[in-house]
Image (cartoon, rainbow, N blue to C red):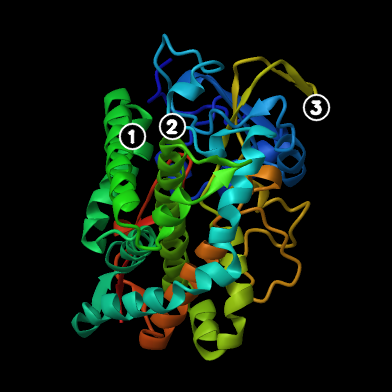
Amino acid sequence: MDETKPVEDWTTDFNIFDPQYSRDPAPFWSEIRQTCPIAHTGRNGGLYMTTSYNDAQRLVRETDILSNRQISIAPMQADKDLLADYHTEVNPPITMDPPESIAVRRLILPFFSVKAVEKHRPYTEALCHQLIDGFIDQGECDAAEDYAQQITPRVIAHMLGIDETRNEEFVSWVRGLIEDGFSDFDARRDNLKAMTTFFQDMIEERRRYPTGDYISDLITKDIDGAPLTDKIIVNLCVLLLIAGIDTTWSSIGSSLFHMATHDHDRKRLASEPGLFPSAIEELLRFYAPVSPGRIAMKDLEYNGITIKKGERMMMNFPAANRDPAQFENPDEVILDREQNRHVAFGIGHHRCAGSNLARMEMDAALRIWFERIPDFTLTDPGAVTWSTGQVRGARRVPVKF
């Protein structure tokens, strides 16, 4: 079908790449949720999409039917068997299903405990100060490009024991795989190959010269007494790079966009630092960035629809976080919201293992920004841009202070 054709009915032909959807998807979620909570489109090879909190909670746990082996909703090559070929590509635990994924997930969770990620806070805070030092005297910057998008690649590089000057290379790989690679098979393949080759070289180097970083630690681990293969270690590193960069910088950038456009919330957070914990959870709820995909391994009957074997579904966690059946005044940011069981980090077995790291990075980034720049506003609303697809976040946020 013509992917550029305007949408006439969002319940039967939604388009997550529509510019209006990109700027503010909430009205479209509301329309779909009120009409048919699970929408369908023929675009990009066909896709279902949840919009309600309860549907997301129920369907995400159907791991024996709705498989994680295809978390991307990108179109696949015509000769690719979506149900059989996932082992031929990178296969970190996020694309495994239970019980296969359980042992690998248990392996990485200690790296992302609260205690473990707090070890990286001093580096993160020093980095935030360093970035602000670079533009504060100018009285203006792009809060997304000059700040949010500079933090997560460097933190990940720090965790991996890699020279942080390579962060632009990391960013290009992630964008090439997730954004450019969505509709460009060659870009997807080339960027994935670049990542895996880089990490394979790093593994070989760390085997010779261990440094105590993430890769060095993984080399010493085992699953049921069997040492980790290089492929598993590479996959775990790729997962950290993909999941740890784009998602968190999206959350930080969107949070700064919000504060630059909501004077009352900005002034309140600046004057009440005790609000940061609840404010961060609320900003995560409101600007949740990720909508992972699933693929049906067999037919699934659910609420009057049939999701056929081989069809894909997007678990729209951001839409679930705006469901009025779950959240009071869902389309309003309430910095001290008390009841906030948001699903920004997912649900169930595949809930984000790096949630503690993301929270630490957001906390450090926002606290230090407000400490140094408590008074700031958006300079040009028309210049603000948002990413589209499965990871949504503010990409340009020009501000003055």
Disc 1 marks a residue whose amino acid type is Leu
Q: Are marks 3 and 2 in contact (CB under 8 Å)?
A: no
C-alpha gap between disc 2 and disc 1: 8 Å
* Disc 3 from disc 2: Cα separation: 34 Å
Q: Secondary structure at mark 3?
A: loop
Residue beneath label 2, please? 90
Report x, y in % for residue 23.
Answer: 44, 50
Q: Earlier in the sequence, mark 3 or mark 1?
A: 1
Residue at horizontal 48 percent and vertical 69 percent from the top: 362
> In the image, residue 174 lies at what x, y percent?
34, 44
Left/right placement of residue 17 relative to residue 97 reads left
Which secondary structure lies at badge 1?
helix
Q: Are marks 2 and 1 in contact (CB under 8 Å)?
A: yes
**Is the residue 155 above or below the residue 77 in the image?**
below
- Exactly how many numbered labels are in the figure? 3
Circle 3 residue: 303
Q: Is residue 171 visible?
A: no
Picture layout, residue 139 above or below residue 17? below
Residue 77 appearing in the image: yes
Q: Quadrant of the N terminus?
A: top left
What amino acid type is highlighted by mark number 2? Val
Q: Residue at x 48, y 78 (%)?
A: 263
Measure the alpha-carbon separation of dots 3 and 1: 38 Å
Badge 3: residue crowd in 10 Å (few <14, some 14–19, many ≥20): few
Q: Residue at x 46, y 80 (%)?
A: 367
Looking at the image, tell me whether mark 3 or mark 2 is earlier in sequence order. Answer: 2
Q: Amino acid at mark 3?
A: Asn
Residue that label 1 marks: 192
Quadrant in which the C terminus appears: bottom left
